[in-house]
Each structure stands twice: as C-alpha cells, then as structure tokens.
Image (tube, grey):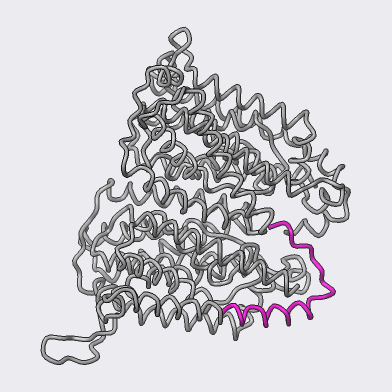
Amino acid sequence: MIDSVETVKRSGWTRAIRLITQAKTSAPSLIIMYILMVIFFALMSKNYLTLTNFTSIMSNLTVLGIAAVGMTVVILSGGIDLSIGSMQGFTGVILALLFNIPFRLPIPIIIFIGMIVGSLIGAINGFFVTKVRINPVITTLGTMSIFRGLCYIFATKYVGRIFDPTYLAMNRLYIFNALPISFIYMLAFMGIMAIVLKFTKFGRNVYAVGGNLLAARLAGINTDRVRFMAYVISGLFSALSAVVLTGQLGMGRPEFGTGNELEVITAVVLGGISLAGGRGDFFGVLIAVLILGSIGNGMVLLNVPIYWRQVVKGFILIIAVSIDVIRYRRSRS
Amino acid sequence: MSQVTGSMGSTKIEEKGVKKFTLTNTLILFIMLVVLMIFFSLTSRSFLTYLNISTMLANLSFIGVTASALTLVLITGGLDISIGGTIGLVSCLVAWLYQGGMNAGYAMLIGLAAGMMVGALNGVLVTAVGLNPIITTLGTMGITRGLAFVITDGRSILIFEKTLGLLGRGGIKLFQSGDTLITFPIPVVLLIIVYAVYWFLMEKTKFGRQIYAIGANTRASYLSGVRTKRTTFIAYLLSGSMAAIGGLILTSLTAVGMPQHGMGQELNVIAAVILGGTMLGGGRGKILGTLLGVLIISVLYNGLVMLNVYFYFVSIAQGAVLIAVVAAYEARKRRVA
C-alpha cells in the first residue's frame, strides 16, 4: 500500500515491462538452493541419489505442480485463490461419479466434463471478484467452504473407486520405467502457460494488471476480463490436477485436496511470484515445486520424524521470501 | 489490497461517511442476529433452552477471544493466518508441561508467553523485514502446527486439572432450586471482559485511532508522526496473545491438549471478523461488529445442527452467508461513495 501512492504517477507500461525484466532474479538463488539440498541429502542418505527415488519424487509432486500453474496466473494478476483444494476435491468426486454411473461415457468426455466443472467454479470466483467486487481472499474462502460441503453431498451415495484401466494407466505410466507420464503433463502445462504469459496479449495483460491495476485500466486494458480469466484458468488447472490425483490413487474421495491450497501457495511464492502481483515466472515455480517435493522425500529418507516436516517447510517459506524481499529492496534503491 | 489510492485531501469528508456507514452496518448485523435467533427458536424446540444457549456461548468464546485481536490486525491492513496453529501449539505445550509435573498456573503462563512469541515473530517479520503478512503467517502457521505435533509426538494429552478446567468449563452460580443449577459460564465472562477492553482500546485511546489511521493510509499516518511499525507490531503481538488465550479456553473446554486443536479455525475466525464489517485491506471495522459476526456464525452453526441439517450443508451455508454479507457491504459502500 505504501508504494501505491508513488506508482500511480508512473506509467503502467514502463512499470510492467520493468517488472517483467526483474522477474528473473529469484531463479538463480532457487537453483543454488536446490543443488545444495540435493548434495546435502545425497551425502546424508545413500538411497537419495537413485533413479527409483527421483522417479518417486517426480510422480509425487505432479498434483502440486499442476495446481500451481493456475495459482501462478491468479497471483500474477494480483489475486489469490484459496479454493484450489476444494476445487480439486469437488472435481475428483465428479470424476469418480462419472466412472461409477451405469451409463459409461468415454474417458475424453469425462475428463472434459471435469475440466468444465473446474472452469465453472473458477468462473464463479471470477464473477464475485470482478463483478460483485468482493475481496479475492473472502470470495475464495467462501467458495472453499461451499464446494467442500458439496463434495460430501455428491459423494455420499456413490463409492468413489475408479477401476478403468486406461484412465489409471494414463496417470501411472512410466516412460522408460523411469519418467512418470504425469510429470510430463506438468512440464507441458507449465510450458504452455509460460508461452501464453510471455508471448500473448493476454499474458502481457496479466502482468500489467497485477503490477498496477489502476495504471493497467488507464492504459485501456479490460482489467475485469483479465482477472476473471485468471480465476477460470486456476479452476481449469485444479481440475486437471484432480484428474492426475484420482488417476494416481484410483479413487475420488470428498476429503481430497484439503489444505492443498496452502502448499500450492507456498510453492508459488517460494518460486518468486510476488503476492502483490505482476512479478515472477514459471521457471522459479518449477524449481520451487522440485524443492518442496525433495524436502519431503529427503526428510523421510533421513528418518526425520514426520511432524518436523511442517516446521521445516514453514521456515523455508519465510527464509525464501525474506531473501526475495531484501533483494528486491536492494535492486530498487 | 493495492487499490487504496491515497486521497489525502478528502479524509475529513470520508471519515464522516465511514462513521455513519459502519454504525448502520452494526445495526444490520444485530437485526440479522435477532432474525436468526427468532427463526431457530420457532423451528427448533431445543434451540432456545438454557442448556443449548450456555453451551453455545461457552463454545464460541474461544473463537470470539481469538477474533478480538485479529480485528486489530485486519484494520491495520494485515492478516494473521497463524492463529489456528498458535491455538494448537499452546494447547499442546500447556498439557505437556502439566503432564511433566509443572503447576498448571505456570504452564498456562508459559503457554501465553509462547503465543506472544509467535505474535512477536509475526510482527517482526511483517514490520521490520517487510514481508507480506499472508505469507509470513502462512509460514508461522506451518511452524506452530508442526511444533504442536512435535511436542506431543502426534498424540493427545488428557488434562484434568482444576485451575485450567475453570477457564472453559467453570461457571458462576446464579441460582439453584432442587436439581436445576443455573450457572453463568466463565469463558463467557472472559469474552465480555476481552471485548470491553478492546472496545475501550479502539474507541477511546490514541492507540486505537492510530490502528485505524495505519489501515486507512500507512504512509500518511507515518508522515503525520504515527510510529506505524511499532503500532502494527503490537497488533500482531496482541493477536498471538489472544490466540493463546483462545487455545487455553479450548484446552480447558475439551480437557485435552491436542495438536489438531484449532486446525482450520483460522478461516472461521477470519470469516467472523469479516462478517462483522472489517474489510481486508484495512482502515475500517468495529470491535462490536466482530462480536456480532462471531455470534451470527455460531448461532447459524448451532441452529442448523439443532435442525438436524447435514454438516455438509452447514459448511455450504457458512460460505454462502460470508459471500452474501460481504457482497451487501460492497453494494452499500458503492452507494455511499
């Protein structure tokens, strides 16, 4: 809020472009952090630096990574989405439901319906944020509660197991017995969205809206539409992560995804996406997802009691953000 | 949050408009509460009974106490998500210390100190380091929740103790005739005291005015001589302390120190504060509004449970009420502005 007084005076475009060029700054420190962590775990545990272990790390972090794609776009546009966990749970329940009804639809149509469901929830969030003008935190807090409730209502009458072998294989397959196919999905989604953000008008607008909402509006951008689309994208990728989640676990339970929103936000912010909006890119998010996945895995291999994991993750989040803030402050002065 | 564009010239007019606007908001909340009470009294036979009302009030007191100081943090334009974790940490710490043979009174004091330390850590990170409050308290939420599990090794510790038990389960005897004993629950007394203190603090003291000023325009209040960082720090410190007291009440109510205590409660408490008319982004809000928000959420929850409504529908109703009320605030604000 302090710099909003100053920024109004500056041109939105020069500021937006400046912010995009500065976005690369957090990636190097993350890579160094990741390499140090790998070296540390490799020295401490002989099982860490094995192919099997890396395969399991990769397949475990894909749900987080895919959900982080949508969250990145929302946070870049200056918003936040706390309903991600509920959207995952709700879409998962719907997917499981569609596999269990007597009239079986083909798999692509089921996945498509899941994507529509996620996008619609995202559109509800977007509508309340842009048209009714409710603060994003409150809106998504409300929809989080609503859709978690709906999860249980839709799940009561049906067993959530999914047996379809094709669907399960789609999410569990390993290429060359090593590379999980879901990890490829994650990389592909990140790549596509990175290209969209870098090279399309919509992508530029997301950065501009997040960097300075007022300036973006004065520059003629339809800010409401950009922010609305960001929430729809978030819903879409939550649904896609629910597809991977239900495929990997072979079921869709109503409690799936509870608390995931905090892990996803942690990954995105650790990846250098500024919560104030308009700053950061996908490369940092990818490294952050890798770091979070490796920490969990490494601590298991080191026999660290499971309860310390949360403490360590909390400290890492705070330290990473502190470094980012201090560097940003220095680069400005 | 970054939508506030400092229009310093018109503060006087704005302040008048704001005052009128929040007063009526509090009234609307009060009417809403009364309507809900009447509705549930008519539809459920067991709602308006001494047993139900006193239990409901005792149960809401820990949310209410926690929400009181969170209101201050929200008015400064910040947010504290770590309150749920603090509740769990304090609960486990007190039970663990008591199990280790410590006097319950000292254990409670140490629990309170732990909550203050969490608040102070949040305050330092937000004011001195300049971190985003959501991220900071997200981090400390993970840390406190994790520590709660570490302390008790994931187990729950039963704690039947007189002094601590008094805090949540105790009551002041009002009258007794035969078998019926009517008592006034001590947590409700505590709740009333807490809200009286915070009402005085926010309405009658310089500190309260400074909290509002920081939320309305941090830079302008800094330039006019408010020690913004110190005041914001105190708001986070109070939030941690009140969460600790909330944790003590909850531990006492349930007679168990449990690492899962308060899990997800941060969202309930934030929802109550926002329902009470405090806006995210700061500068606006009333302590009494928060109390009404807590009451409305609790009455809604309790009443729907009394009507045998599915728990899942209760969750949906709470979310819908939150969005509806805030939408109404926004509509009113636009009309006033």
Rendered-image quadrant of the N terminus of chain A = bottom right
User: Is residue A305 at all visible to an observer of this figure?
Assistant: yes
Identify the residue shown where x is 66% and y is 70%: B283
Q: Seen from this angle, which residue lies furthest top?
A: A176
Is B13 included in the stretch rendered in magenta? yes
Residue A121: where, in percent of width, then height? 55, 45
Identify the residue shown where x is 28% and y is 46%: B154
Residue B333: where, in percent of width, then height? 69, 71
Residue B16: where, in percent of width, then height? 73, 82
- B245 relative position to B127: left or right: left
Magenta part, dominant SS = helix
User: Is residue B167 at all visible to an observer of this figure?
Assistant: no
| Along the line of sight, the residue nearer the viewer: A216 or B78 | A216
- B254 relative position to A287: left or right: left
Residue A86: where, in percent of width, then height? 47, 45
Image quadrant in which you'd find residue A258: top left
| Along the line of sight, the residue nearer the viewer: B221 or A175 | A175
What stretch of residues is rendered in magenta? B1-26
